[in-house]
């Protein structure tokens, strides 16, 4: 379905002009090819862009038109004078790559744009100044509908259960610790991010909030071309990124390689009041400082070989390795019920972490004809290895004596494989059938070892803690098959699908030689309806069923510690969460303004809640030990409204904004087995998120970008969180006849990106805490493009006045 421009048309006696645009060499359909239609008498301009399969269908009045079909880096095809008095099919239009020399090659995604589609939003990563020199977490923090918390947790429309894919597939690059893994992927390696809130049956059912699909760069420009980026920053930061590709008639070779060195200071504070009259330490105040030193390398190398005019094979290897040395200090003051100081300690954790992730993919694509018949076969294998050594010391500062000495060893390994087969067959231009299979296999191993000194008088040895030490192995096999049917009835589009997923799990613990086997199968129906008005106005209605499977950390029952008095453990009896979701969307385009709205509702049964409770035990310092763990507790309903706005009041000023307000209602009760106290976990929370991105062109062609974010306050049954505001400013100037750019980026200008929370556990704990993962940063980036030159063309995502909606 074509996405129409906003030019208003005279629709009396209207007719339909249609066709398909493909690459003349590869015979691949060209998505987002631009069709510009100009009335030769009235000079009115209208048009549209092609869809995923290269098709377009545009309604216009009967008249004589000049038609121009264009795509970036391709020679346009023109129909200078067409007298159109009835429906006209222009047939298959073949575009050839421009051959005007390397100086005329266009940089793909030089402009950052937000493409609002009927089924998803696509954030194209281009000249976004605020993420230059950043990472995937920074990229996602700028994407409409997406929020990244201070801790790095990614959420979609306020819901943290979002599936993150790399190139449309699960990947070890996201890793078991998604927040940290995303910080290892450089922003320069990302081409675009797709936000899919109502996924069709083609996609995995995992992720109750929806899917974020990160597409890595695989340039296809003719000849040899690329770019080199150098980064410096404060606190100490250095990096480089090299992107290049070499394209011939039969081959396309591409690479993205980058290195990062960065220091990332952070801090945390907590003030805990323990409510028991017998508490040895009635108040505990902690001040933490995080000194993080990270070194990482990211490289992606791939090759595409065109077997025939209609088929190709693509191989790709991605490697991500890192070595971190972190030092965390924690000043702890403990007071009795009278407010007198019981003990003052200084705790130091020196952690060394090494990790590597590698992914191999092999894809085969065959477009049998120009009518949409297509077969694709994808294979992938990936692995992740992470080793952590943490030496911990604690000194009693009142007497200057060592009172705690620990050593922690952690090992995490993940191996995964994937096979996916998709077949698409079109009947004419309006009917499409699709079927496919996907098999996912994952094998995750975790081990935890803690040894600590017990005899300090005689400098005794480190003794293993048999109560904590354990290993945990998790194997998962998911076999899925789907069918879906799509048809367009004039202005109505219908896509109906059904997906079946069968899950087999095996969980093995070293302690107690516990083994659990779980098997279950689920059906996941999807329905997406679209109605297209004139002038680029659309309404969509979607329904889908999604699943949230417990994995790894959520199931692993042996405890891990964020501090001596805070213990987290998984729950081996945790069941999956099934969510039914409805989404009603509206899209309208005007000359300088685009509005996309969505009203959504979902309901989840057996929803997970993370419980924090008193264990009844004390540390050696007399601190009560609290335990956190997930359980299937509640029924949760979520209702929300989302607005995404693109407005360009002037050529030099572009505004992109999104606003999301949502209400969460949860109902459930939990009884503490240690105290036999039942707590009601019912809560109702209304929160919101607003983002405003502005890009202004100043005199001397200096680009200024201002990104403003605010996440409103929120709460659940145990914790209330305050709102978080942040502001980033960046500026850039092109140099050397637009072959290079110099940019300056200042993140968190007001030092306000701090999480502030208040937690209450009845009759046990009242706690106020603050956390700042990353303090303000200043970055300078220099980019040099070789065998590339910026050039404005009609193509890609331009409006009828030649200006794109930029982010």
Image: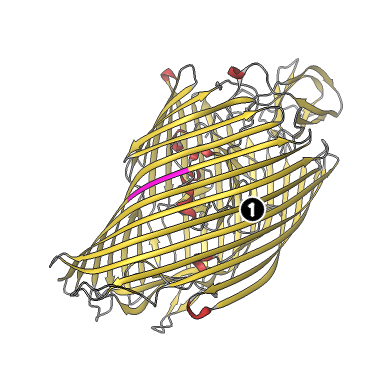
List x then y, in percent, for residue 587.
64, 41
Mark 1 lies on residue: 583
Residue 43, by quadrant, is top right
Determine if the magenta segment contains residue 393: no
Question: Relative to 219, is 324 on the left or the right?
Answer: left
The overriding secondary structure of the stretch rendered in magenta is strand
Q: As displayed, is residue 81 above or below residue 259?
A: above
Question: Relative to 95, is 154 on the left or the right?
Answer: left
List x then y, in percent, for residue 630.
48, 70
Q: As displayed, is residue 184 above or below residue 258?
A: below
What is the secondary structure assignment of the residue under circle 1? strand
Question: Relative to 694, is 419 on the left or the right?
Answer: right
Residue 221, by quadrant, is top right
Front residue of this view, candidates 791 and 369: 369
Identify the residue at the far left of this view. Answer: 399
Residue span colored magenta: 292-297
Q: Is residue 807 visible?
A: yes
List x then y, in percent, for residue 208.
59, 59
């Amino acid at each position: 379905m074509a996405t129409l421009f906003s030019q208003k048309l005279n629709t009396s006696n209207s007719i339909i002009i249609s066709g398909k645009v493909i690459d003349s060499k590869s015979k691949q359909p060209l998505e987002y090819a631009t069709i510009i239609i100009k009335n030769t008498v009235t000079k009115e301009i209208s048009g549209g862009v092609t869809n995923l399969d290269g098709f377009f269908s545009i309604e216009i009045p009967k008249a004589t038109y000049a038609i121009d079909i264009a795509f970036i880096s391709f020679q346009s095809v023109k129909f200078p004078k067409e007298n159109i008095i009835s429906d006209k099919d222009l047939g298959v239009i073949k575009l050839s790559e421009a051959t005007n020399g390397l100086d005329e090659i266009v940089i793909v995604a030089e402009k950052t744009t937000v493409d609002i589609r009927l089924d998803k939003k696509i954030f194209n990563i281009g000249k976004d100044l605020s993420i230059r020199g950043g990472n995937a977490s920074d990229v996602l923090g700028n994407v409409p509908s997406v929020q990244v918390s201070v801790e790095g947790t990614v959420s979609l429309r306020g819901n943290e259960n979002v599936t993150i894919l790399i190139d449309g597939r699960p990947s070890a690059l996201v890793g078991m610790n998604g927040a940290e893994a995303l910080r290892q992927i450089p922003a320069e390696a990302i081409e675009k991010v797709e936000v899919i809130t109502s996924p069709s049956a083609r996609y995995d059912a995992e992720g109750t909030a929806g899917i974020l699909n990160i597409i890595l760069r695989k340039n296809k420009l003719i000849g040899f071309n690329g770019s080199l980026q150098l980064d410096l920053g404060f606190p100490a930061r250095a990096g480089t990124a090299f992107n290049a590709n070499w394209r011939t008639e039969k081959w396309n070779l591409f690479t993205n390689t980058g290195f990062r060195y960065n220091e990332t200071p952070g801090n945390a504070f907590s003030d805990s009041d323990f409510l028991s009259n017998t508490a040895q330490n009635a108040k505990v105040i902690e001040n933490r400082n995080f000194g993080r030193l990270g070194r990482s390398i990211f490289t992606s190398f791939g090759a595409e070989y065109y077997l025939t005019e209609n088929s190709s094979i693509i191989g790709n290897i991605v490697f991500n390795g890192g070595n971190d040395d972190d030092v965390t200090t924690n000043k702890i003051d403990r007071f009795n019920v009278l407010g007198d100081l019981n003990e003052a300690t200084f705790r130091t954790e020196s952690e060394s972490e090494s990790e590597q992730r590698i992914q191999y993919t092999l894809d085969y694509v065959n477009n049998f004809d120009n009518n949409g018949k297509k077969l694709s076969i994808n294979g992938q294998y990936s692995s992740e290895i992470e080793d952590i050594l943490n030496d911990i010391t604690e000194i009693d500062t009142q007497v200057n004596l060592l009172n705690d000495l620990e050593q922690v060893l952690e090992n995490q390994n993940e191996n995964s494989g994937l096979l996916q087969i998709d077949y698409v067959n079109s009947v004419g231009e309006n009917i499409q059938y699709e079927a496919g299979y996907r098999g996912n296999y994952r094998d995750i191993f975790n081990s935890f070892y803690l040894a600590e000194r017990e005899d300090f008088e005689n400098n005794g040895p480190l003794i293993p803690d048999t109560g904590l030490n354990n290993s945990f192995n998790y194997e998962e096999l998911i076999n899925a098959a789907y069918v879906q049917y799509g048809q367009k009835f004039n202005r109505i589009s219908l896509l109906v699908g059904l997906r079946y997923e069968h899950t087999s799990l095996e969980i093995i613990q070293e302690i107690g030689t516990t083994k659990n086997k779980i098997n279950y199968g689920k059906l996941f129906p999807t329905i997406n309806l679209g109605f297209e008005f004139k002038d680029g106005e659309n309404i969509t209605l979607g329904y889908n069923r999604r699943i949230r499977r417990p994995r790894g950390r959520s199931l692993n029952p042996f405890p891990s510690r964020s501090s001596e008095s805070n213990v987290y453990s998984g729950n081996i009896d945790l069941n999956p969460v099934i969510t039914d979701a409805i989404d009603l969307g509206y899209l309208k385009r005007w000359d300088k303004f685009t509005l996309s709205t969505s009203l959504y509702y979902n309901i989840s049964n057996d929803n997970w809640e993370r419980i924090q409770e008193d264990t009844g035990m004390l540390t050696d310092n007399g601190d009560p030990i609290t335990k956190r763990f997930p359980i299937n507790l509640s029924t949760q309903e979520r209702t929300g409204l989302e607005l995404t706005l693109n407005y360009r009041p002037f050529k030099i000023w572009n505004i992109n904004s999104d606003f999301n307000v949502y209400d969460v209602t949860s109902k459930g009760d939990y009884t503490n087995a240690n105290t036999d106290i039942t707590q009601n976990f019912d809560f109702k929370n209304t929160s919101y998120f607003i983002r405003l991105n502005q890009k202004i062109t100043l005199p001397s062609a200096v680009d200024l970008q201002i990104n403003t974010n605010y996440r409103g306050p929120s709460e659940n049954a145990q914790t209330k969180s305050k709102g978080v505001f942040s502001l980033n400013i960046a500026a850039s100037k092109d140099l050397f006849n637009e072959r290079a750019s110099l940019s300056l980026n200042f993140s968190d200008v007001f030092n306000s990106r701090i999480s502030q929370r208040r937690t209450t556990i009845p009759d046990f704990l009242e706690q106020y805490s603050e956390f700042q993962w990353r303090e303000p940063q200043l970055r300078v980036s220099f980019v040099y493009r070789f065998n590339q030159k910026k050039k404005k063309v009609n193509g890609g995502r331009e409006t009828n006045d030649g200006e794109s909606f930029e982010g």
